[in-house]
Amino acid sequence: MSHPIMKATLDLGQSLWLDYISRELMESGELQRHVAEGLRGMTSNPTIFEKAIAGSTDYDSDIRKGVAGKLSPQEVFENLAISDVSRACDMLASVYKDSKGLDGYVSLEVSPKLAHDTARTVEEAQRLWNRVNRPNLMIKVPGTDKGVPAVLELLTRGINVNVTLLFTLEQYKAVLEAYVQAMEARLAAKQELSHIASVASFFVSRIDSVADAQAEKASRKDLAGKAAIANACLAYEHFESVTASARWKKLADAGAPVQRPLWASTSTKNPDYSDVLYVEELIAPHTVNTLPPQTLTAFKDHGKPSLRLRENMKSAHQTLADLQKSGIDVQQIAFDLIEDGVVKFAKSYDDMLEAISARLKTSA
């Protein structure tokens, strides 16, 4: 039975994905309930897997198998992740089929330690793609300077990509250009375009966490809670300009789907703000919002879907100009957060391997 708020959001052109994965979620029947209500996809990252593995005993049996097989912590983790993601792909296969490949995707991230290594990112992404072997898998690749060429190569090969850790407009422009170039390369090679899927994950709330602190120091509390949404509006403005171009029309006519902007990091960090702020304010056609479980619960409870993003676009440039005049450089904040995000994901990856290593020792 579809949930009225989730259905209303989908009717406005936005797909809601869950920013979480765990065995318990799948074995308890909770994921099936989410899908029945209108959930359209899932994303994972090292932080999510670290919480799932370290916070439960659900994986102990497989970890013991890893001990018996003399596997490294990295090999044990990969086996756990492949198992969970493959299972989630199968549970979302009906969404993939019913939406004709628009939704139903599950994302699996290459190691964040490869964020600055193009060749190894491509190699690992291809290997993970082959191991999962599901058409509704997306490989997550960070949109760093070295990650973008990997995105171009993978999409050209026909591998679905979720480009993650996007904070700046310049990053987003480079990622969308890579997508267009990949589609052009496939068209020139007379390869199929319609089954390729990609999203560009633009991070939101982390920008406000930094900008708000600077606004308070500048005695401009009136600008609090506005930087992240305005920044996202610029990305969507660029998306609309590219997809309205003659260059894109040629690809669309050949069957190429758009690379949808995906709003990530949409849980509200500031308790003074609405707990659904970064969902309600960013609804627009051809977008995805990936919500942590608590944000999804809150949105289903009291969300009010409407096309607010385009309304916010009208004031976005002025908002960013006002912030700049007050000494708050949103683009610089966003740029600094790119490497910060890579470092945090790498730490989560290390923490997860340490948790597995500890379990391996106690299970030996």
Image: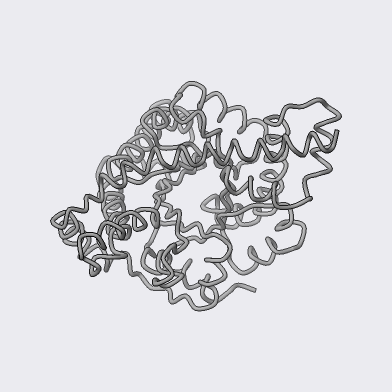
Residue 120 x, y percent position in the rendering: 52, 22
Residue 117 x, y percent position in the rendering: 46, 24
The outermost residue toward the front is 217
312 and 295: which is toward the camera: 295
The outermost residue toward the top is 119
Residue 258 x, y percent position in the rendering: 40, 47
**Residue at image point 42% right, 43% down:** 165
In the picture, the quarter occupied by the N terminus is bottom right
Q: Is any part of residue 137 visible from this angle?
A: yes
Q: Is any part of residue 190 visible from this angle?
A: no
**Residue at image point 30% right, 60% down:** 212
The answer to whether residue 297 is above or below residue 193 is below
Side of 202 where 351 appears, left or right: right
260 and 20: which is toward the camera: 20
Side of 21 where 208 appears, left or right: left
The answer to whether residue 274 is above or below residue 341 is below
Side of 110 where 151 appears, left or right: left
In the picture, the quarter occupied by the C terminus is top right
